[in-house]
Image (spheres, rainbow, N blue to C red):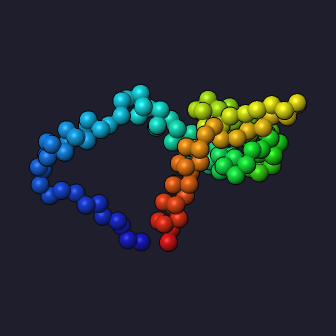
Amino acid sequence: MSKETIEVCRETIINHEKVKSARQNLPAKSEIDNLSDTFKILGDPTRLKIVIALAWEELCVCDIATVVNLSVSAVSHQLRLLRNMRLVKFRKEGKMVYYSLDDEHIENIIQLAQIHVREFSR
């Protein structure tokens, strides 16, 4: 098994202009925290499966439970977390509750990540 090497600078020379520019372009702490929380939520395989399934079509809780092979109760818990992060939304139709992605940005994030992973695994 070969070890990967990490390339580092051999000289400690700081380009103050680039550092200043990079710092100015960083989002505010609250935005960084929200982004981090979003990626943490999507970092769970079950929640990621749910989001990918919902990228294809709106599903009821029972359908989602069947897709991810979990109990309705377990899926409801995961959906609550996803709802709290505004990644999914729901609508009621009679006694049925249907879930879908909150907006197209969520689908775009997943699609871009899938492209990245597929290119990496070639």
In this figure, what is the number of numbered marks? 0
- Of residues 37 and 24, the one nearer the viewer is 24
Q: Position of residue 25 (x, y in %)?
A: 30, 38
Tell me the quarter of the picture where residue 111 sits: bottom right
Extreme-right residue of the structure: 95
Q: Residue furthest front?
A: 104
**Residue 11 location in percent, x, y?**
11, 55
Q: Is residue 112 left or right of residue 65?
A: left
Would residue 78 appear left or right of 72 to someone viewing this image?
A: left
* 9 on left or right of 38: left
| Residue 3 in view (yes/no) | yes
At 36% from the left edge and 67% from the top edge, which residue is drawn? 3
Quarter of the image with the N terminus is bottom left
Q: Position of residue 112 (x, y in %)?
A: 51, 55
Residue drawn at x 36%, y 34% as measured from the top left: 27
- In this view, the residue in front, 38 or 103, is 103
Residue 44 visible, this angle: no
The front one of 58 and 19 is 58
Q: Residue at x 68, y 34 (%)?
A: 89
The image quarter in which residue 9 lies: bottom left
Identify whether 37 is placed above or below 52: above
